[in-house]
Amino acid sequence: MSLIETIKTKAKKDVKRIVLPEGEEPRTIAAAKIIRDEGLAVPVLLGDPARIDAEGIEIINPETSDKAAGYANELYELRKAKGVTPEDAAKLVKDPMYYGIMMVKLGDADGLVSGAVHTTGDMLRPALQIIKTKPGMKVVSSSFLMDCPNKSLGENGLLVYADCVVMPNPTAEELAHIAVSAAETARALCDIEEPRVALLSFSTKGSAKHELVSKVQQATEIAHQIAPSLLLDGELQLDAALVPEIAASKAKGSPVEGRANVLIFPDLQAGNIGYKITQRIAGADCFAVLQGLAKPCNDLSRGCSVDDIVNTVAMTAVQAQ
Ligand code: ACO
């Protein structure tokens, strides 16, 4: 079974309620029907019912909803220290993105998927401001689940890449938290029982000296402190992370042993380029999720297909379980 089929099977076992703020958008409506028909989740569409043809699917109009006033009060309480006034809050909850985030915050939905229309930044900001990080986690970041044709790599071809979406230039401490989060994602979504985490660099075990290398070395130390039992090593070049023979010569004694299944990139440029290289040149299927949020919210690419939306809802539902 492919990774996404396994995730869909899991989603069906404990059905969650997932809100889709871009409810008037045609791909989203088509996806909601598939999600409902396949029993992957209970979809809730936000928008004007007059513009949504989706019989049998719950539609909520934030403009007229009787819950909007309560959500506005809560939003004001959460953000008043940041200068949000009651009038601002009342206006913000009419925006489906904020309305959906408040549904998740207050438990009226288990998760949210958006981004077919909104940019990554516009989708992320309300989630970061309102849902916030889960206890003990310093940052929200992302993992890409990479299902590669070469089954000799990672966990039978499965690899988790982080961070490829959120943090442009993480500090050493933030990078450590990204590594620990990605290992959790590998366990929760990919059924990888033993994540083996490599913090990547252009240097292996001090072969080069540079402030960029020092950051990855520090991040490795901090990650060891946060999660002492996690199999984790750095700084490693990609080949020392993935090829046992190269690890044996360049990184003797590495706990990862050239068999990494979780790859941590030093910054967003490396991560974003890295996943796209794997997708385009190696032909991997890839699926993005946000990690570190107190409740699951996930972003779509604006070029997403109906299938991408269905898949992301299934992953969000599993994260909510
Ligand atoms: N984790 C936790 N909280 C965060 C994070 C984070 N990574 N980043 C920002 N925040 C919090 C801030 O502390 C702040 O909270 P507060 O308002 O309660 O004080 C709130 O979020 C907003 O912070 P800002 O600094 O105003 O937000 P910013 O403008 O930095 O935006 C964002 C954050 C949107 C994540 C930004 O870093 C960004 O644009 N990242 C890149 C996104 C992107 O374009 N990715 C590549 C394309 S996606 C693809 O290819 C699949």
Image (spheres, helix red, strand yellow):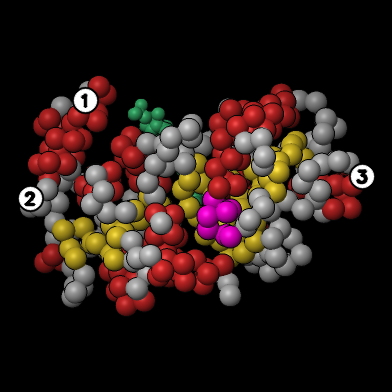
Query: Counting other residues with Cα less than 10 Å from the Cα at mark 3, is it few (<14), some (14-19), or many (20 or more)?
Result: few
Disc 1 and disc 2 in contact, CB within 8 angstroms: no
Magenta stretch containing residue 189, yes or no? Answer: yes
**Relative to 57, is 134 above or below?**
above
Q: Secondary structure at mark 3?
A: helix
**Relative to 83, is 300 above or below?**
below
Q: Which residue is mark 2?
A: 66
Magenta stretch containing residue 190, yes or no? Answer: yes
Work out whether residue 103 or residue 28 is closer to the camera in this orientation and state it: 103
Q: Quadrant of residue 301?
A: bottom left
Q: CA distance from mark 1 to mark 2?
A: 22 Å
Give the percent coordinates (x, y) of residue 60. Answer: 16, 58
The quadrant of the image that shows the C terminus is bottom left
Q: Secondary structure at mark 2?
A: loop
Residue 80 badge: 1
Which residue is most to the front? 229
Report the span colored magenta.
Answer: 185-191
Q: Residue at x 58, y 60 (%)?
A: 191
